[in-house]
Image (spheres, helix red, strand yellow):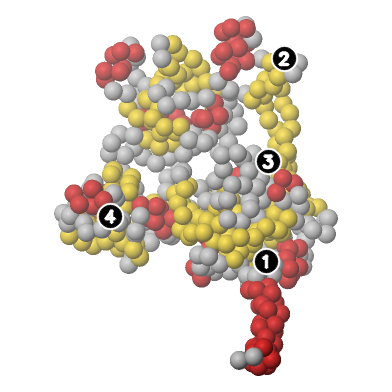
């Protein structure tokens, strides 16, 4: 075949190739998401929230302020002779967050931690209007707060259905990261139903959307412009975005909002068990073919599970027909169940499935002691246990309870550590767990109280201030 024949043979294919290459960029562009219309339509319903709160601290010197109740109080008192850690002082602190309007008359959803301890809350719209907001209520277990601002015919978001959200789907966030108002970031859903430490009542939506300080409380949108989540947390070792962010599913948030709107408070369902993950060796030991479910490690005496006959060693594998694949699946389901409702649990007992009917009760503010004798105080943010007799003799104390775990909260702020022995609260001796529970329940809000702690060979007082 000569060159002329080859050219004639290739000419129609060259035309097709050129057409394909011309259309390829347009086809690729069509596959990429366009958030412009979403932002234009629903961006005005996203608000910036600024709060002001009073911080009570102590002046240590001309250039040093420390919060009140810091563990350095006793250090400065002993070594520098500064009484009670220095002269008391109050100063104002400001913080920023985000939120979104859910009704034309001015109801705003945000995170509870955005407005925690706030003396003043200002909500700013995209058109630069500002309103002072009132807190209708907040629920720290789910980290949701409901605010109210004056106004009529305000822009609102559209609420979506997180159950229809698929892993890998595109989502977008609007908020005020680092104070940069009305910033838009986008990414995909990385996982659903994610449980996080100390956040057992929320099945988080995990994304790779860039979320930073200031985004908290803002909406997570799907591609239809519907809010499917409330941006709440990031996983970071630097304080900034590192590729993982977590949002509260909007159905969970709206359940809380509806309760706050009608009663001003939130009731959570309670089963009264301490659960743990089922590992492969544990599954084999319980004669289970797969390591799924929630293993009951402890049962609260006289709690709902105890009344229904749940035992230590039972493995809860389903509730009302819904499979429990991991231990983290159970608390969000129970927590969102109405108080007084009935639930059918499927448990593996002695290698066989057993049906157990239980009546869900309201989660108490201070959960009762478990069968193991430990007590978790959500009000303080710590877990305490009875003081072993051998340790009591070695420390030469008659009563007291031992701090086993400290989480985020007033106890951590005051400087409590695992291993501390609490001897007295507000000058009242602590004889044991039951008295500790009663004393904590009676503590005032916003007023520091002295707590006598045995730490190592010595004793010290810690100033404990409760915010709820």
Q: Please give left or right for residue 104 compared with residue 259 in the image.
A: right
Looking at the picture, how far across and down is residue 23, in whole percent? 69, 80
Mark 2 near mark 4, Cβ–Cβ under 8 Å?
no
Looking at the picture, how far across and down is residue 187, in whole percent? 61, 60
Cα separation, mark 1 vs mark 2, equals: 49 Å
Instruction: Please identify the quadrant where the C terminus is shown.
Output: top right
- Does residue 247 appear in this view? no
Which mark's residue is nearer the viewer, 1 or 4? 4
For label 1, count other residues whose C-alpha is less than 10 Å away and answer few (under 14), some (14-19) or many (20+): many
Q: Secondary structure at mark 4?
A: loop
Q: Please give left or right for residue 139 compared with residue 59 in the image.
A: left
Q: Camera-side residue: 239 or 427? A: 239
Instruction: Please identify the quadrant where the N terminus is shown.
Output: bottom right
Looking at the picture, how far across and down is residue 293, in whole percent? 31, 56
Spot the residue most to the front: 2
Q: Secondary structure at mark 3?
A: loop
Looking at the picture, how far across and down is residue 322, in whole percent? 35, 65
Seen at 65% across and 47% down, the residue is 212
Cα separation, mark 2 vs mark 4, equals: 58 Å
Cα separation, mark 3 vs mark 1, equals: 25 Å
Is tag 3's residue or tag 4's residue first in the polypeptide sequence? 3
Q: Which residue is mark 3?
A: 118
Q: Camera-side residue: 134 or 31? A: 31
Cα separation, mark 3 vs mark 4, equals: 45 Å
Which mark's residue is nearer the viewer, 3 or 1? 1
Which mark's residue is nearer the viewer, 2 or 4? 4
Q: Which residue is mark 1?
A: 157
For label 4, count other residues whose C-alpha is less than 10 Å away and answer few (under 14), some (14-19) or many (20+): some
Is tag 2's residue or tag 4's residue first in the polypeptide sequence? 2
Circle number at residue 61? 2
Circle number at residue 468? none
Q: Which residue is mark 4?
A: 291
């Amino acid at each position: 075949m000569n060159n002329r024949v080859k050219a004639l043979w290739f000419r129609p294919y060259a035309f097709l190739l050129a057409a394909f290459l011309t259309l390829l960029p347009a086809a690729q562009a069509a596959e990429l998401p366009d958030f412009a219309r979403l932002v234009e339509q629903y961006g005005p319903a996203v608000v910036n929230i600024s709060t002001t709160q009073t911080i009570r601290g102590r002046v240590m010197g001309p250039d040093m302020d420390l919060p009140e109740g810091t563990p350095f109080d006793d250090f400065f008192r002993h070594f520098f002779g500064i009484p009670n850690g220095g002269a008391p002082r109050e100063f104002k602190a400001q913080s920023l967050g985000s939120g979104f309007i859910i009704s034309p008359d001015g109801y705003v959803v945000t995170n509870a931690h955005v407005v925690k301890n706030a003396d003043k809350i200002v909500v700013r719209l995209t058109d630069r209007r500002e309103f002072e907001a009132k807190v209708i209520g907040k629920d720290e277990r789910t980290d949701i707060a409901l605010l109210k601002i004056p106004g009529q015919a305000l822009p609102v978001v559209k609420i979506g259905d997180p159950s229809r959200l698929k892993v890998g789907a595109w989502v977008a966030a609007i908020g005020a990261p680092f104070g940069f108002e009305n910033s838009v970031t986008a990414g995909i859903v990385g996982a659903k139903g994610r449980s996080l430490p100390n956040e057992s009542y929320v099945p988080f939506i995990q994304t790779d959307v860039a979320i930073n300080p200031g985004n908290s409380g803002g909406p997570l949108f799907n591609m239809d412009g519907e809010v499917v989540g409330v941006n709440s947390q990031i996983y970071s070792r630097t304080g900034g975005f590192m590729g993982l962010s977590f949002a509260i599913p909007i159905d969970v948030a709206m359940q809380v909002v509806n309760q706050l709107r009608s009663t001003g408070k939130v009731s959570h369902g309670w089963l009264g068990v301490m659960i743990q993950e089922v590992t492969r060796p544990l599954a084999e030991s319980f004669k289970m073919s797969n390591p799924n479910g929630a293993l009951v490690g402890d049962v609260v005496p006289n709690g709902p599970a105890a009344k229904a006959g749940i035992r230590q060693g039972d493995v809860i594998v389903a509730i009302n027909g819904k499979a429990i694949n991991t231990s983290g699946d159970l608390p969000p389901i129970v927590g969102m169940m109405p108080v007084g409702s009935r639930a059918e649990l499927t448990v593996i007992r002695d290698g066989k499935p057993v049906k157990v009917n239980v009546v869900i009760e309201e989660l108490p503010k201070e959960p009762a002691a478990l069968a193991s004798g430990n007590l978790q105080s959500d009000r303080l943010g710590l877990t305490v246990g009875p003081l072993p007799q051998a340790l009591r003799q070695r420390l030469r104390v008659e009563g007291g309870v031992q701090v086993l775990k400290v989480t985020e909260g007033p106890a951590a702020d005051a400087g409590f550590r695992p291993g501390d022995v609490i001897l007295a609260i507000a000058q009242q001796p602590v004889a044991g767990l039951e008295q500790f529970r009663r004393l904590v329940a009676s503590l005032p809000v916003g007023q520091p109280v002295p707590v006598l702690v045995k730490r190592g060979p010595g004793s010290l007082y810690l100033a404990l201030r409760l915010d709820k």
